[in-house]
Amino acid sequence: MLNQAIAFVIETIFNIFILTALVRFWMQALRAPARNPLAQFTMALTDFAVKPMRRLLPGFFKLDVASLAVAWIAEVVLLAILSLLQGVEIVNGAALSVILFLALVKLVRLTVYIIMGAVLLQALLSWVNPYHPVAPFFEALTRPFLKPFQKAVPPIGGVDITPVLVLIACQLVLMLPVAWLEGEAMRMIGRFLL
């Protein structure tokens, strides 16, 4: 019972940080404007880890590799802590390699959640207040995912249904490849239980 409570607190704190570092990566990769409170919060929360990492990992093809590396390392640390709390022996290379792989899969899952959240918020803002200061931020995050659907499906009765199609596609990605990869990694981790 105490292990579950400790795991919950650790997982919550780490997931907030990981999610923020991942948003920072996508924010810079998709050239989202940084002059809004959400972007400023993201930068302020992750600067302590990303700025030193940039000395080791400079940008690559205009991508903020340091932010992605910080998110991945934090996910690896989180999975290692949770594995230790569950009694998984991670001292051998095979268990560590599975944790490294599972951390990548978890980042893919979080990226899909970021896309889903941004699409929902962007759609709501477009109906309620399209001129809100964070609207350009969400528009920049969602444009690459909405654009292909918008080219294929015109508005129906003046209503753009492409956000719904993007959400369906995201759910399918979560249900099929991501769930399968997570299941395989968890099955491999199960072999290392004490």
Image (cartoon, rainbow, N blue to C red):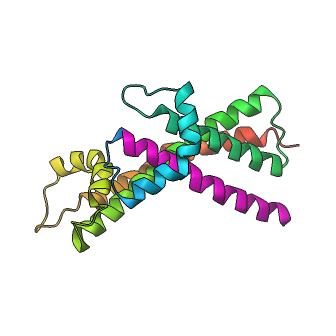
Quadrant location of the N terminus? bottom right
State the residue at coordinates (32%, 56%): 138
Q: In this view, does 138 lie above or below 187?
A: below
Q: Is residue 81 above or below residue 61?
A: below
Q: Is residue 30 above or below residue 159?
A: above
On the image, the x and y values in percent for residue 113 come to 46, 54
On the image, the x and y values in percent for residue 141 come to 33, 50
Instruction: Pick whichever, 135 or 34, lies toward us.
Output: 34
Instruction: Pick whichever, 192 or 99, lies toward us.
Output: 99
Determine whether, in the image, residue 94 is placed left or right of residue 55. Answer: right
Does residue 54 appear in this view? yes
Q: Which residue lies furthest to the bottom in this view?
A: 128
Q: Does the magenta stretch include residue 22?
A: yes
Quadrant hosting residue 163: bottom left
State the residue at coordinates (57%, 33%): 53
Number of numbered discs:
0
State the residue at coordinates (28%, 49%): 140
Determine whether, in the image, residue 89 is placed left or right of residue 77. Answer: right
On the image, the x and y values in percent for residue 56 come to 56, 25
The magenta stretch spans which residues? 1-28
Does residue 113 appear in this view? no
Secondary structure predominantly adopted by residues drawn in magenta: helix
State the residue at coordinates (31%, 49%): 33
Q: Is residue 34 magenta?
A: no
